[in-house]
Image (cartoon, rainbow, N blue to C red):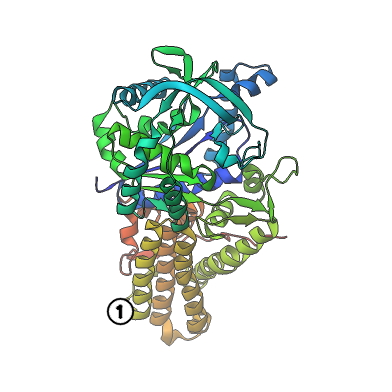
């Protein structure tokens, strides 16, 4: 439905503390949710936790806890981090929620009734930490998990299967007709090649694993954690219980995932939906991994980046900005304190923060904090640049190209700094005959700050709110479509500004 936007993160497995990878995906989803809300759209933003499976049961046993006690403790870490990062999710779903269990079982029965689920026997290799089955062909003679490198377990047991093999051709046709279903393009090509190689039926139950959702009518089996987890996207939109909610948001579903779990979301999940006769999501976007100073994150190396520590040291908006600006979304990125400090000082302190602080200081120094909208406000160079920036900003955001979208906003920042230096208000202030022109220059700079505050709000909500409060126009954020106000001539009749403090003092490092 036009005017609605549904964005999801993966539901994160609660076997460990959240790290920069979790923060990255969730921050990107939050940026998109805030952006679409600012366009006046109805938005549903969900995240949550995946809490079932053999790995959780074993971890709980080792800790002397029940599985429920363990997940109830660990989930708080994710919820606390999202609060500290100003994540604006509408729903936090847990796979232990009773409503989700009912949705999973009803979906299982639906596919079984349609003939796509059958009972057989599974024999093969299984990675407990990754909750992933592997074929002999995928292993290429090595009996370790291709993803995590840990030893695999040989399983032979009765199992329910999903007839995934029946969806090779239907999924290929869909990919041919929807080349932007999987993004970026390199991931689309990866998925297309994988599906073209032929799909095999997927085991979707475990025998003897007690911590999970029971197969309806056969409680000795629990439903495979990936089959369970993927259905969370339907639980959130009221599948089977709230038709209006489902019809409003499901047609606009967008999934953000890490590249390591792309096949589950771009092969297994759409095949499940096709089997159920449901529309597919609009897009599955797979982003890259973060390394730390060129090395893969590892607890044994002690180089896992704790987002809470970064936020405590540097501030939440600097962290959010770095995640979205440092690397093109979809590619791998590298985190180092040096890169963080350099990016923050160059972009936020020396450019963005410097423009705002110099402007507000001069407004106070020369006009006691008040500047009325002057006559002949128009400026063709400003207007042409803003129009181009807006168009390109929206286009990049529609493709989840966050770094490039911010690059467009920073064109305004750089232009504002050049304009300030070239017009030199400090010299105008010395000539009483240039008072009207001084007002015109200061007003344009203040209006540039107003527009920048709106543009950066999805990325740095705390900073943007403070900036707009300095300018006395924070009510912009209460408008049903704030992004429509990013235009010349829509500023207030009078800017009455607060005495500022620097938005981004320079970091040492």
Whole-percent x, y for residue 28 in the image: 48, 49
Residue placed most toward the observer, 349 or 20 = 20
Residue 19 located left or right of residue 385:
right
Let me know if residue 73 appears in the view. Answer: no
Image quadrant holding the N terminus, namely top left
Whole-percent x, y for residue 487 in the image: 33, 66
Residue placed most toward the observer, 452 or 39 = 39
The residue drawn where x is 51% and y is 42% is 261
Q: Is residue 34 above or below residue 139?
A: below
The residue drawn where x is 36% and y is 34% is 272
Whole-percent x, y for residue 200 in the image: 44, 36
Quadrant of the image occupied by residue 439: bottom left
Let me know if residue 353 appears in the view. Answer: yes
Residue placed most toward the observer, 415 or 175 = 175
Residue 216 located left or right of residue 507:
left
Circle 1 sits on which residue?
A: 376
Image quadrant holding the C terminus, namely bottom right
Residue 452 located left or right of residue 144:
left
Residue placed most toward the observer, 441 or 30 = 30
In what element is the residue under mark 1?
loop
Whole-percent x, y for residue 122 in the image: 51, 24
Q: Is residue 198 above or below residue 372?
A: above
Q: Is residue 443 above or below residue 509?
A: below
The residue drawn where x is 40% and y is 72% is 443
């Amino acid at each position: 439905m036009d005017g609605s936007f549904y964005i999801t993160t993966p539901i994160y497995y609660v076997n460990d503390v959240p790290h920069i990878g979790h923060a990255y995906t969730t921050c990107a989803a939050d940026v998109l949710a805030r952006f679409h809300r600012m366009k006046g759209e109805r938005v549903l933003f969900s995240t949550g936790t995946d809490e079932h499976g053999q790995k959780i049961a074993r971890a709980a046993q080792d800790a002397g806890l029940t599985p429920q006690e363990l997940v109830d403790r660990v989930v708080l870490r994710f919820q606390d981090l999202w609060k500290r990062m100003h994540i604006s999710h509408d729903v936090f779903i847990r796979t232990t929620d009773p409503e989700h269990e009912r949705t999973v079982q009803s979906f299982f029965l639906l596919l079984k009734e349609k003939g796509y689920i059958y009972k057989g026997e599974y024999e093969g290799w299984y990675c407990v930490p990754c909750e992933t089955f592997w074929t002999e062909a995928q292993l290429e003679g090595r009996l370790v998990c291709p993803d995590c490198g840990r030893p695999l377990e040989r399983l032979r047991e009765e199992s329910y299967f999903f007839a995934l093999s029946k969806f090779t051709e239907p999924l290929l046709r869909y990919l041919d007709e929807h080349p932007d279903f999987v993004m970026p393009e390199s991931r689309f090509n990866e998925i297309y090649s994988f599906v073209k190689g032929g799909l095999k039926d997927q085991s979707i139950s475990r025998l003897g694993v007690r911590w999970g959702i029971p197969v309806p009518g056969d409680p000795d089996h629990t439903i495979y954690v990936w089959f369970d987890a993927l259905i969370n996207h339907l639980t959130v939109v009221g599948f089977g219980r709230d038709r209006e909610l489902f019809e409003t948001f499901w047609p606009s579903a967008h999934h953000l995932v890490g590249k390591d779990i792309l096949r589950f979301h771009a092969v297994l999940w759409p095949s499940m939906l096709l089997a159920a006769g449901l529309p597919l999501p609009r897009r599955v976007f797979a982003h890259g991994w973060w390394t730390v100073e060129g090395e893969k994150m590892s607890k044994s190396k002690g180089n896992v980046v704790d987002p809470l520590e970064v936020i405590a040291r540097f501030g939440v908006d600097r962290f959010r900005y770095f995640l979205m600006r440092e690397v093109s979304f979809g590619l791998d990125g590298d985190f180092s304190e040096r890169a963080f400090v350099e990016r923050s000082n160059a972009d936020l302190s020396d450019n963005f923060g410097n423009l705002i602080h110099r402007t507000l200081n001069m407004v106070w120094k020369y006009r006691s904090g008040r500047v009325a909208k002057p006559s002949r406000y128009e400026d063709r160079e400003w207007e042409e640049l803003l129009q181009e920036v807006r168009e390109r900003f929206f286009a990049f955001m529609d493709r989840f190209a966050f770094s490039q979208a911010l690059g467009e906003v920073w064109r305004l920042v750089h232009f504002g700094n050049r304009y300030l230096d070239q017009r030199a208000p400090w010299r105008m202030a010395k000539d009483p005959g240039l008072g009207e022109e001084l007002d015109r220059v200061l007003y344009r700079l203040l209006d540039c700050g107003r527009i920048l505050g709106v543009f950066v709000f999805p990325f740095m909500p705390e900073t943007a709110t403070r900036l707009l409060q300095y300018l006395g126009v924070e009510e912009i954020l209460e408008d049903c479509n704030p992004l429509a106000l990013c235009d010349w001539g829509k500023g207030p009749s009078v800017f009455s500004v607060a005495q500022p403090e620097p938005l981004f003092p320079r970091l040492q490092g």
